[in-house]
Image (cartoon, rainbow, N blue to C red):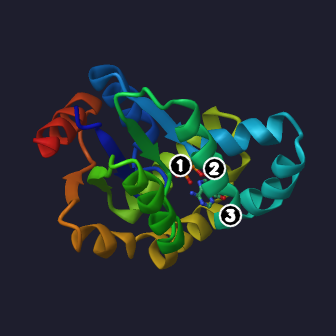
Amino acid sequence: MTKLNIVLFGPPGAGKGTQSQFLQEKFELIHLSTGDLLRAEIKAESPLGNEAKELMDRGDLVADSIVVAMIRNKIEAHLDAKGFIFDGFPRTKAQAEALDEMLDGKDEPIVAMLSLEVPEGELVSRLLHRGSEGSRTDDKDEAIIRNRIKEYSQKTAPLKDYYSAQGKFKAVEGVGTRAEITARLVKALG
Ligand code: ADP
């Protein structure tokens, strides 16, 4: 059976984490968030975590080699998965190419890149709200939030063209209720 490998895409604050949970349950997929994996490394105070922390605290991207290796390990650890939801990965063209190489080698390509579209003003207010309630230091400071959005616009948004060229890019309106957005994502999967 073809695996349901999905890239859930969108800027910081677009709702990728929330929506991943629902898609994961509905289709019995493995959810791989590079942000969550990196935060676990920071918590464990591993050398990798210590290296990533400074960059994440500034809102800069972590090195491609680090996140690619983390994803590779997870894919190898779940060879019998029905599919993966990639959340927050890939974020650069080099990461997207590395992911294609990993999956094409197994003949299990990405089937769709679902892109949650949310206006910038809405993103900033969602993230500041999350920062006021939670523990993520990168959500507490508007300058850091703006830097993450800038990193997204410059390095990550161009991946829309990368997946468009493969006929996999699907834009999904990311403003609405949680359930409305889940329904749009499921519909986009066809
Ligand atoms: P958000 O999408 O809200 O910014 P994430 O948890 O996806 O949250 O990412 C938090 C931070 O982790 C990013 O700002 C970046 O520093 C780092 N990070 C996560 N995924 C990647 C990735 N694929 N490549 C490089 N850096 C990453």
Task: Check disc 1 and give the amino acid type.
Answer: Leu
Q: Residue at x 20, y 57 (%)?
A: 170
Q: CA distance from mark 3 to mark 2?
A: 25 Å
| Mark 3 or mark 1: whose residue is earlier in sequence | 3
Label 1 near ligand 1 (CB < 8 Å): yes
Q: Are marks 3 and 2 in contact (CB under 8 Å)?
A: no
Asked if residue 61 can be seen in this view, the reply is no
Asked whether mark 3 and ligand 1 are closer than 8 Å, the reply comes as: no
Q: Quadrant of the C terminus?
A: top left
Q: Which mark is residue 157?
A: none
Q: Three-letter amino acid code at disc 3?
A: Ser
Q: Earlier in the sequence, mark 2 or mark 1?
A: 1
Label 2 CB, ligand 1: below 8 Å?
yes
Which residue occupies the foreground of this view, 82 or 173? 82
Q: Quadrant of ligand 1?
A: bottom right
Write down the residue under mark 2: 139
On screen, residue 64 versus residue 6, left or right, reads: right
Q: At 53% from the left edge and 49% from the top edge, which residue is drawn?
A: 127
Q: Position of residue 45 (x, y in %)?
A: 89, 39
Q: Which mark lies nearer to you, 3 or 1?
A: 3
Q: Determine whether label 2 and label 1 are within 8 Å by CB.
A: yes
